[in-house]
Structure formats: C-alpha cells, structure tokens
C-alpha cells in the first residue's frame, strides 16, 4: 500500500513536460525583455538618486559633484546652496515617500514627496521641511547623474527665521520654495 501511494505521488512529477521544468524554454517575448530592461534601469536610476541624497546628508560635496550632469542648468548654484546647507545644518536626513520612477534606456524621471529633518547649527533648533520634487536622471558612461530638478528641492533649505520672543524651541520652518 505504501509503495502504491509513493508511486501515485511521484507520477505527476514524472509526467511534467520539459518546458515546465525550465528545459528548452523559448526566450520571452520582446515586450517582456523591454520591461525587464526598463525595470533594471529604473532601479539603477533610483539607487543613483538615493546615493545623491546620501552624499548631501553626509556633506560630501565631491560626491554631489560626481553625481551631477555637467549640463545641469544651475550647476554652480546647486553646489553653492548645498555648501551653505553643509555649514548651516547638522544631522540632515531626507526621507522619500511614494517615489515613482519612469525610466527609459538613458533617461529616468523620479517624482517623490520628501521630508527633510535637520538641526540648525546656529540655534540648535530642529527643523523640518517638506515638499514634492521631480528629478530627471541621465545615464552617462560613468553612471546615472542628476540632469534637472523641478519643484521643491530637498537640496536647498531657506535660512530659519530668527526666533521671536516667547517662540518655543523646535518650531517648524515654513515650507520652502526654490530660489527664483
């Protein structure tokens, strides 16, 4: 009886066609290959943007510069404002919420809501800014680089207003707007 049950259970495994076992499988259709390439490119662009954010949080100006496309409009202004933040802020942390990545072979668009927490170096007051950003990442031979940014930039923080008399410590900063 035990032999019969073992043979009965092994029968379906023996009759599985070779294609189901993974042998002699045809290549996926072109659409699936493109989707896999697009997904890989989207993940690579997202990792590059995360690396850019980590370089900003760590105050790494050289790392920021390496991840910026030289054709970025406002290249020097971007680096200047980042340098000002490195001197004016401490413990910078940027958190992305709901990032959406649309990628092609050489270009990716990342849209996200973000929140930046930091401590103002002059007053030791915590700060919080929030916004929405759209970034354009461009793939170069050296990797993905930031080519354009639109919306509320997480890389720029307006200086905190001087605390008024009776103002409590840790008050929130107003929502930032990019420089004109």
Image: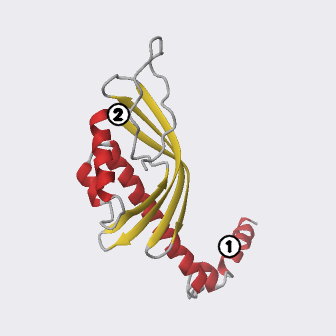
| Residue occupied by mark 2 | 91
Is 50 placed above or below 36 here? Answer: above
How far is the residue under mark 2 from the one under mark 1?
A: 61 Å
Near-viewer residue (13 or 175): 175
Are the residues tagged 2 and 1 within 8 Å (C-beta)? no
| Quadrant in which the N terminus appears | bottom right
Say which of marks 2 and 1 sits in front: 2
| Residue occupied by mark 1 | 10
The residue that appears at 45% across and 47% down in the rendered structure is 178
Label located before the other in sequence (2 or 1): 1
Q: Secondary structure at mark 1?
A: helix
Residue 147 left/right relative to 11: left
Would you call the spot at circle 1 few (<14 residues within 10 Å), some (14-19), or many (20 or more)?
few
Residue 150 x, y percent position in the rendering: 48, 56
Near-viewer residue (38 or 134): 134
Q: Secondary structure at mark 2?
A: strand
């Amino acid at each position: 009886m035990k032999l019969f049950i073992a043979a009965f259970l092994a029968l379906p495994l023996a009759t599985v066609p070779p294609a189901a076992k993974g042998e002699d499988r045809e290549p996926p259709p072109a659409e699936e290959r493109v989707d896999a390439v697009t997904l890989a490119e989207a993940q690579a662009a997202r990792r590059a943007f995360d690396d850019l954010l980590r370089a900003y949080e760590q105050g790494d100006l050289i790392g920021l510069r390496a991840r910026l496309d030289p054709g970025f409009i406002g290249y020097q202004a971007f680096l200047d404002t980042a340098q000002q933040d490195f001197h004016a802020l401490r413990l910078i942390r940027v958190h992305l919420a709901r990032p959406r990545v649309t990628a092609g072979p050489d270009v990716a668009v990342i849209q996200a809501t973000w929140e930046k927490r930091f401590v103002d170096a002059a007053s030791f007051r915590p700060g919080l800014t929030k916004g929405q950003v759209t970034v354009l990442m461009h793939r170069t031979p050296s990797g993905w680089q930031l080519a354009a940014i639109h919306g509320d930039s997480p890389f720029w923080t307006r200086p905190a207003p001087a605390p008024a008399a009776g103002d409590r410590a840790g008050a929130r900063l107003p929502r930032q707007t990019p420089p004109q």
